Structures are given as structure tokens and as C-alpha cells.
Image (tube, coloured by chain):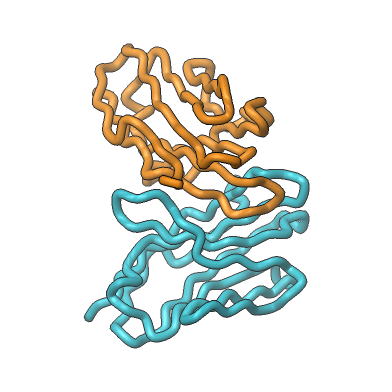
Chain colours: A cyan, B orange
Amino acid sequence: QQQVKQSPQSLIVQKGGISIINCAYENTAFDYFPWYQQFPGKGPALLIAIRPDVSEKKEGRFTISFNKSAKQFSLHIMDSQPGDSATYFCAALQGGSEKLVFGKGTKLTVNP
Amino acid sequence: DAGVIQSPRHEVTEMGQEVTLRCKPISGHDYLFWYRQTMMRGLELLIYFNNNVPIDDSGMPEDRFSAKMPNASFSTLKIQPSEPRDSAVYFCASSLGANTEAFFGQGTRLTVV
């Protein structure tokens, strides 16, 4: 049973374009939704995170949009750059637990 | 701080052998996590510790896997005996807990032949 469903599996974007990655969840007890970025040969690193009391969070070129009623959240990368090429994971955490549940990842390629 | 340190970075072993992966968490972090990453299953939480005590090991695939945290600065994940299907990248991560950022090590790529 996959608790966090992520799409697409892979994404190719031109430099300067917008990259959008979507995630959906079923467990309404989740209350913390981070996004992790992973480069080849490295461990995942926290990129940005949101809690369900807000609908959007922006940090630089990265924005999380959160739709609590639809149980969906997405990552938008504005003005995508070749250096953004990596695998992105959405995740979710239930309050009172430290068990972070990850989506299966999206491999983003930004062409120059 | 140097971050979460894992060793070895790569391990190749023969089926049936014992494998021990090591992790040094960030100093002061109360939580330590072991994850396994494969193409098929993605990132899976195997076990996590709080203040050196195992809290949830429901992700450990079977009795061949065991993890220990003898002190706040060291943890091991052992596979005995190893099997080819154990081939994966194993990550250790640590955090301050309470829904805070988890910092990952660079991982150990295990290949069982």
C-alpha cells in the first residue's frame, strides 16, 4: 500500500520553464509535508516543507501548493535550471510519529 | 559538524556473508533512521531510534536484518546472511525529532552477488 503517490515518474523541462511535480495522500493524520532533493550518489536533502494550515509556501524559485480538501500537494520550480536536475521526493509525516513516508520520486531533467 | 557519516560507501559481498553498515549521526540529534532505497520500492524506512532506543522496526524486512545503537554517536545495520535481493543503497539519517528536518548521510551502496 503506497501511502504517498507521486507523479510523474520522470520529467524533462527546458531551461527557464516551470517544473511541476504532484503528490497525493490518503492518511488525513499526516501533518507535515516535506520535499527532498537527491543528486546522484548523494543522500536526499530537505528542499522545502509545508504544514496543512497554509495553502502555499514559497522559498526562492521553489513553491509548495497544498490542497487539504483534495489531499494533494505539489512542488513548482520556477525558472528551472540545469542545476535543478535531480530526483525529487515528496514525503509525509503523521503527527506524533517520526515515520517519514516517501513518494517514489520524480527524476527531473532540465535541458540547457 | 560533518553531517551524517556512513561507512563503507560501497560494499560488495557474496551471498551468505554477513554485512555490517555503520552510521555516525549528527551530534545532538536524538533520532536516527535507517532507510533502504531501491528502484522498485523507492525509499523505505527500516527502523528508527530515539535516544538510542529502537522505537519502530516494523520496516525491517526479516530476521536477517538487525540494527543496534550502542550509544548516541554510533549505529549499525547488520544483514546476516545476505542475499542478492538485499542489494540496495542504505541510508542513515538523523534529526532533532518532533517533525524536524532529517539529515541524510551519503549512503552505502550494497551489492550482494
Q: Position of residue A36 (x, y in %)?
A: 49, 59
> In front here: B106 or B16?
B106
Q: Where on the picture, by quarter, is residue B49?
A: top right
Q: Where on the picture, by quarter, is residue B10?
A: top left
> In front here: B80 or B3?
B3
Q: Residue at x 39, y 57 (%)?
A: A38
The image shows residue A101, relative to residue B22, as above or below, that is below
Left or right of B65: which side holds A15? Answer: left
Q: Residue at x 73, y 75 (%)?
A: A54
Quadrant location of the C terminus of chain B?
Answer: top left
The image shows residue A65, relative to residue B76, as above or below, that is below
Left or right of A28: which side holds A50? Answer: left
Q: Position of residue A46 (x, y in %)?
A: 51, 59
> In front here: B61 or A46?
A46
Q: Position of residue B91 (x, y in %)?
A: 44, 39
Q: Position of residue A55 (x, y in %)?
A: 69, 78
Q: Residue at x 32, y 68 (%)?
A: A85
Q: How many marks?
A: 0
Q: Residue at x 32, y 74 (%)?
A: A12
Q: Where on the picture, by quarter, is residue A32?
A: bottom right
Left or right of A99: which side holds A39? Answer: left
Q: Residue pushed farthest front?
A: B1
